[in-house]
Amino acid sequence: MSGIITSLGSILPTASGGSPTNMGLSTLAGNADTWSADAVWLYRVQATVSGTLQNAYVYANGTNVSVKKALVFNAASSGSPTSADTYIVSSGIITASGSAGWNTAAFASGNITSGNYYLIGCVMSIASATQQVLTENATPLYYLASSGYFLTPPADAGNVTSSSNFGRISMYVTIL
């Protein structure tokens, strides 16, 4: 059995065997939702494996070209975002091609632990046009429009507490 040995000697499962595991919504949701620039959009997921973040994938459903970064936060609980939900890492820049499809960028680092909760989502560049993304009704989609989040993501998710009835973005991260 492969895994990470914890300080107590137990073994946590990892995304082993060379194939990455997806965390998030890797299918196409049914609603088109328009994002504004420099807004953070997050939804809560629970990790099923331990490992290192590899790539972020976001499905853009519009013809406007947009520039985004994926964000990952530790989540202190399965409830609404709080200041205890701390920032882990953002991906490289994800540039939409101008047509509908999956867009991707790599993470430079970031560790995920099986069983823990995380907030994953995106922030769009202030210079980008509005972009449609696909969302579905599920767990709440939390958001906050502010200034400067594309260049410097918030240190925690404590202010990202407005919510939408659309619960998940067609967006996922891979863990290896």
Image: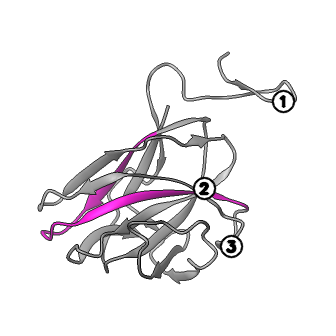
Residue 117 x %, y %: 65, 54
Quarter of image, res 25:
bottom left
Q: In this view of the protein, which residue sits in the foreground, 40 or 62?
A: 40
Which mark lies nearer to you, 2 or 3? Answer: 3
Circle 2 or circle 1, nearest the eye: 1
| Viewer-nearest residue: 142 or 93 | 93
Kind of residue sitting beneath label 1: Ser
| Residue 24 percent coordinates (x, y) | 47, 52
**Is 67 located above or below residue 111 in the figure?**
below
| Camera-nearest residue between 24 and 146 | 146
* Amino acid found under the numbered disc labelled 3: Thr
Q: Within 10 angstroms of label 2, few (less than 14), some, or many (20 or more) residues?
A: many
Mark 2 and mark 1: Cα distance apart in space: 22 Å
Query: Residue 86 at x, y = what percent?
Result: 64, 61
Disc 2 target residue: 118
Residue 7 is tagged as 1
Q: Please, what secondary structure does the residue beneath circle 3 have? A: loop
**Which residue was labeled with disc 3?**
82
